[in-house]
Image (cartoon, rainbow, N blue to C red):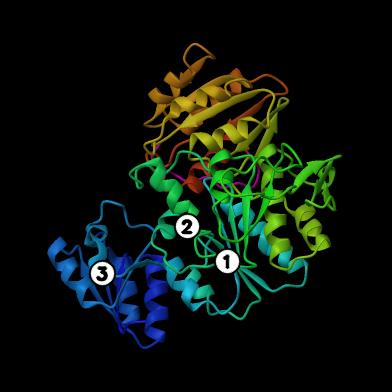
Amino acid sequence: MGERVLVVGLAVTGAAVAREMLAEGKAVVAVDDRADDSVRGRAADLGIELVEAPSPGELARLAQDADLVVVSPGVPARHPVFALGDRVALVSEVELAGRMARAPMVAVTGTNGKTTVTTLVAAMLDASGVRALAAGNIGLPLVEAARRDVDVLVAEVSSFQLQLTSTFRPRVAVWLNLAEDHLDWHPTMQHYVEAKARVWANQAGEDLAVANADDPVVWRAAARAPARVAGFSIEAGAAPPWPGRGDGPRAVFHVAGGELRTPEGDTIAAVAELARVLPHDLANALAASAAALGAGATLEGCRRALISFTGLPHRVEPVGEAGGVRYYDDSKATTPSAVLAALAGFESVVLIAGGRNKGLDLGALRSGAGPVRAVVAIGEAAAEVEAAFAGLVPVSRAGSMDQAVEMARAAARPGDAVLLSPGCASFDWYRSYAERGEDFARAVGAPGVRGREGRR
């Protein structure tokens, strides 16, 4: 690895990269187009030069003077660093961590469910006596985790990070699903698909690719994976036909007889033992089991982790009940596909949706209207949400989260669920999806939940 490193973007991940490169004796320079006092403070603490908002020419000079350019995950696709092409060595934190890692790695990608599955895999390994550490987009920067003394690293990885990989080779690599997302970053859906598929690109031999057999795009890509493949499906125990590459797996991780089972039919856990049993919960449980077992977990370790797992915050999280109506915070659902997955688990729903659209077709929500009694549209995309459900169910618009909850409460009937599942980013009214979810819970009146003041 070279002696000079340019770090593009000095937020949490960029600072972690700089710190690790300094520890290796590299000379580090950082650039940041939106440097504020916190960014300047990081640079000062690290003792590195910070170049604020360089011109394209100045950036090119800095990059060409460096032996390695590490691009942080928050850097937008329009950034001029991506126009430098083959003239410089661009890598992501994931690529860098893969080169540094002391332990074998499980990598998890997909449009939805990454954090949940990453959390579950690490818990399953820990419950099996395997020292595991979850890192990447889940919180701890992967380059920092790469030096830890553990048996297995479990990494949540995004399409942005995978796009800038060339040698990244996880021992186990999971692709959960694919739906339209991040088209404000990827120029086309095919570009997005190809970036996701890079999670398998450098695997070989006894490495394991875990693939969603219910997702045609993912399963088709799995046929080209260079490693062993394990499928998972909530629809059938037999593997679907596998185009383009001989015989694929004959069986997959599946649900049968009220149990989660391995391809060989061994029981992982009874569905009745699980705290969450929506369709996507079962798919996540199967994917995590396949990955964890491939990385050294035991069936009992998988079962113990599954039956103790109650879900993560802001992912179809129950936050209150009143008058026979239950309220769920699914603020993490920032794509139409995530909303559709949540709706599939309910019989009758009043949906609160909207926010800042990420360049996606919200008309896709129309296909999930079956269980929807009424819709409350919020945020910048309220008109798009209203158009998606026009002529199917009543739609009203709210100008604040308090008003949205009141409208939803008025529309709901005993036995209904009121579901905040926005299908959009939060940045019109809030600073994060977590802040949006907390404000929803506050408006619902859930005990012990602290709301925050936001732009409402």
Q: Secondary structure at mark 3?
A: loop
Most extreme residue toward the bottom is: 25
Expressed as whole percent of the image width and height from the top left, the position of residue 94 reads: 46, 66
Q: Which residue position holds label 3?
A: 88
Q: Which mark is residue 218?
A: none
The reply, left or right, for residue 263 in relation to residue 360 is right
Q: Which residue position holds label 2?
A: 198
Q: Secondary structure at mark 1?
A: loop
* Bounds of the magenta segment: 446-456
Q: For the residue marked with disc 3, what is the amino acid?
A: Val
Q: Which residue position holds label 1?
A: 204
**Are discs 3 and 2 less than 8 Å apart at CB?**
no
Q: CA distance from mark 3 to mark 2?
A: 20 Å
- Of mark 2 and mark 1, the one earlier in the sequence is 2
Q: Nearer the viewer, mark 1 or mark 3?
A: 1
Q: CA distance from mark 1 to mark 3?
A: 28 Å
- Of mark 3 and mark 2, the one earlier in the sequence is 3
